[in-house]
Image: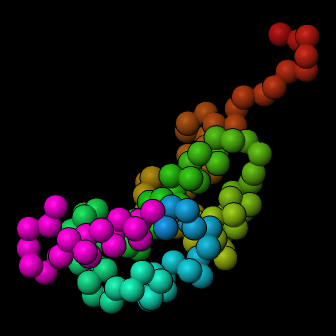
Amino acid sequence: MPTTQTTSLYHYHKAGEVAAYIKLNITRRDQLSLDDLGQRFGICQTNLTKAFKYRYKTTVHYYIIQTRMAIAREMLCDQRKSVKEIAYSLGYKEINHLTRDFKKIMGMPPTEYVQENGVRQHIELPIGVG
């Protein structure tokens, strides 16, 4: 719970609502700007930024990136989508933006992550084989 006067209980709870909204709408890049989030939740950008930082120890922008990368990691293990498809499904307009963010969070690009972690190595055998 907030202990400073600059982060009120109201703003603290609003930050939680914003985080939940981000998780539910992670693919909608157009609705996740700080301005859009502030307007949607009736909180000015300054108070949203302070409350979010206080509650989650990170910025709204970095929280969005972390959330996208958690989903990207899961999707890479899924074996059904290419990195390009994953990028577009997560709201990226360009694949290189996903690659940049993935490398920032994971320390390596998605293709290297797939190789190092053995993802996509599983091959389903036809029924009755193996």
Q: Is residue 19 above or below residue 93?
A: above
Camera-side residue: 43 or 108?
Answer: 43
| Residue at the spot 39% in from the left edge and 86% down from the top edge | 42
Quarter of the picture holding the C terminus: top right
Q: Which residues are magenta?
A: 1-20
Percent coordinates x, y for residue 105 in the rendering: 43, 58
The image quadrant of residue 17 is: bottom left
Q: Residue at x 42, y 81 (%)?
A: 41
Q: Is residue 100 left or right of residue 9?
A: right
Magenta span contains residue 105: no
For residue 9, side relative to residue 5 (left or right) = right
Residues 101 and 75: in front is 75
- Does the rendering let one see residue 112? no
Looking at this view, is 86 or 114 the one in front?
Answer: 86
Q: Is residue 7 magenta?
A: yes
Q: Residue at x 27, y 87 (%)?
A: 46
User: At which x and y percent is residue 59?
Assistant: 32, 72
Residue 38 relative to residue 13: left or right: right
In the image, 85 versus 63, the foreground residue is: 63
Q: How is the image coloured?
A: rainbow
Q: Is residue 31 above or below residue 96?
A: below
As drawn, 119 above or below 129 = below
Give the residue drawn at x 56%, y 48%.
73
Residue 9 shows in this picture: yes
Q: Is residue 66 above or below residue 51?
A: above
